[in-house]
Image (tube, rainbow, N blue to C red):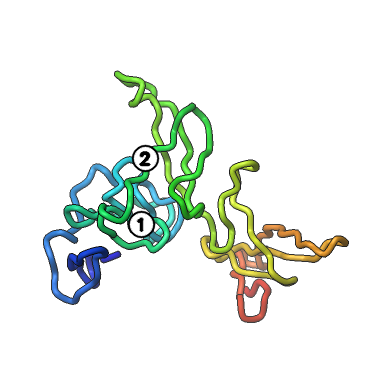
């Protein structure tokens, strides 16, 4: 992954790496193909597998980048990899108003929304891409990101600093994870979760 203000793409035999020297292949491409960022981080483009989005702020337009020719975005490594070692992920939308996984990593999912106007069947569904928090892969059955606890305690939500996951042990020895939000202080400001102390701090 190479950002406009940072390192730049350099093609390799299998994987694109980063360099301090700019390359045309890593320039940000022109809009209007940006998305409204649902979270901070990097998101694959749900339509064009050789594109990806960098989101620096929630609910703001993304920066769209294109992999070098012959490369596609890898959802597991979050890098551009050669088409010779990886297949292009196809749009998973088959029915309107459904939530489906995207890519093999199970860290991304797509909301399939019907378009108001479309000419063909393929154009009738608009995919909106989302990312699950760290350690919370998408569950096809529940159609939700489910946090995986390995011990008891409070753990950060990697996509939201104002919330956290609380893990506690069940009678059968397994774990249950609950997502909780930090409370507002006297001034109406929402506290932020501190992973070091395991609690919300104003």
> Which label's residue is closer to the chain start, 2 or 1?
1
Furthest residue in direction bottom, as rendered: 196
How far from the left and from the top, in percent, is residue 6?
Answer: 24, 72
Disc 2 packing (10 Å; few <14; some 14–19; many ≥20): few
Q: In the picture shown, does residue 87 fall above or below 184?
A: above
On-image quarter of the N terminus:
bottom left
Answer with the quarter of the image where residue 192 lies. bottom right
- Kindly state the secondary structure of the residue where label 1 is placed: strand
Q: In the picture shown, does residue 110 fall above or below 148?
A: above
- Of residue 94 and residue 160, the one placed in the foreground of this image is 94
Answer with the quarter of the image where residue 67 lies. bottom left
- Taking the spot 14% from the left edge, 74% from the top edge, the residue there is 21
- Of residue 198 and residue 109, the one placed in the foreground of this image is 109
Disc 1 packing (10 Å; few <14; some 14–19; many ≥20): many
Image check: 98 left or right of 127? right
Image check: 104 left or right of 4? right
- Kindly state the secondary structure of the residue where label 2 is placed: loop
Q: Where is mark 1, residue-wise?
A: 74
How far from the left and from the top, in percent, is residue 151?
Answer: 72, 71
Furthest residue in direction right, as rendered: 171
Which numbered circle lies on residue 90? 2
On-image quarter of the C terminus:
bottom right
Image check: 5 left or right of 78? left
Furthest residue in direction top, as rendered: 119
How far from the left and from the top, in percent, is residue 149?
Answer: 68, 65
């Amino acid at each position: 992954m190479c950002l406009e203000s940072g390192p730049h793409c350099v093609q390799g035999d299998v994987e694109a790496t980063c360099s301090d020297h700019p390359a045309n292949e890593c320039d940000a491409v022109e809009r209007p193909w940006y998305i409204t960022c649902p979270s901070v981080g990097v998101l694959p483009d749900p339509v064009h597998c050789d594109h990806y989005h960098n989101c620096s702020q929630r609910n703001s337009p993304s920066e769209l980048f294109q992999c070098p020719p012959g490369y596609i975005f890898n959802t597991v490594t979050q890098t551009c990899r050669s088409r010779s070692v990886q297949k292009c992920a196809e749009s998973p939308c088959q029915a309107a108003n459904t939530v489906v996984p995207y890519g093999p990593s199970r860290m991304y999912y797509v909301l399939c929304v019907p378009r108001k106007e479309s000419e063909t069947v393929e154009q009738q569904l608009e995919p909106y891409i989302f990312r699950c928090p760290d350690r919370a892969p998408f569950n096809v059955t529940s159609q939700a990101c489910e946090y995986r606890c390995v011990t008891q305690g409070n753990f950060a939500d990697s996509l939201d600093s104002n919330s956290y996951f609380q893990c506690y042990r069940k009678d059968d020895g397994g774990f249950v994870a609950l997502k909780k939000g930090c409370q507002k202080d006297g001034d109406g400001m929402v506290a932020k979760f501190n992973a070091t102390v395991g609690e919300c701090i104003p």
